[in-house]
Image (spheres, rainbow, N blue to C red):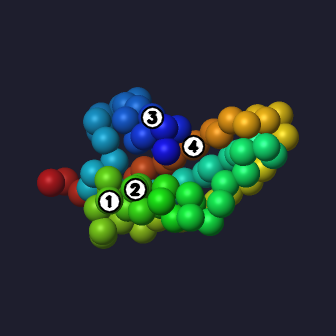
């Protein structure tokens, strides 16, 4: 959850968070020794949905990278922000 929270709090351009995004692309990569369980994936996607809003379409994928060992990498792309 720390990696996901850091991804949602990171600001690169004009938006300070993902609230109001119409679409979210979420990639979660874990190391072989820190493979995520389904419950953890559910918690992460629910957290993202709550932050973005219930109107947001969230598409996620999960992969394993042995080089990460017990680490987790989260990549999040938010698009189609409302004008509100």
**4 or 3: mark nearer the eye:** 3
From the top left corner, tell me how far across and down residue 66 is, in percent: 84, 40
Q: Residue at horizontal 48%, vertical 38%?
A: 2
Please give the residue where the numbered disc 1 appears in the rendered image.
50
Cα distance in 3D space between marks 4 and 3:
10 Å
From the top left corner, tell me how far across and down residue 46 is, in percent: 42, 62
Please give the residue where the numbered disc 4 appears in the rendered image.
75
In the structure shown, which secondary structural element does the residue marked by tag 2 occupy?
A: helix
Q: Residue at horizontal 47%, vertical 59%?
A: 43
Say if residue 12 shows up in the picture. yes
Please give the residue where the numbered disc 2 appears in the rendered image.
47
Q: Residue at horizontal 67%, vertical 54%?
A: 36
Horizontal side of 44 relative to 74 (left or right) equals left
Going from N to C along the chain, the mark reached first, 3 or 1, is 3
Please give the residue where the numbered disc 3 appears in the rendered image.
6
In the structure shown, which secondary structural element does the residue marked by tag 1 occupy?
A: helix
Q: Residue at horizontal 65%, vertical 60%?
A: 37
Cα distance in 3D space between marks 3 and 2:
12 Å
Mark 2: give few (<14), some (14-19) or many (20+) Cα within 10 Å: some
Q: Residue furthest right?
A: 66
From the top left corner, tell me how far across and down residue 22 is, in percent: 35, 62
């Amino acid at each position: 959850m720390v990696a996901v929270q850091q991804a949602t709090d990171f600001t690169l351009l004009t938006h300070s968070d993902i609230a109001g995004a119409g679409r979210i692309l979420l990639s979660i990569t874990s190391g072989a020794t820190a493979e995520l369980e389904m419950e953890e994936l559910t918690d992460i996607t629910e957290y993202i949905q709550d932050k973005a809003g219930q109107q947001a379409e969230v598409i996620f994928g999960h992969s394993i990278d042995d080089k990460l060992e017990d680490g987790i990498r989260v990549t999040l792309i938010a698009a189609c922000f409302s004008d509100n």
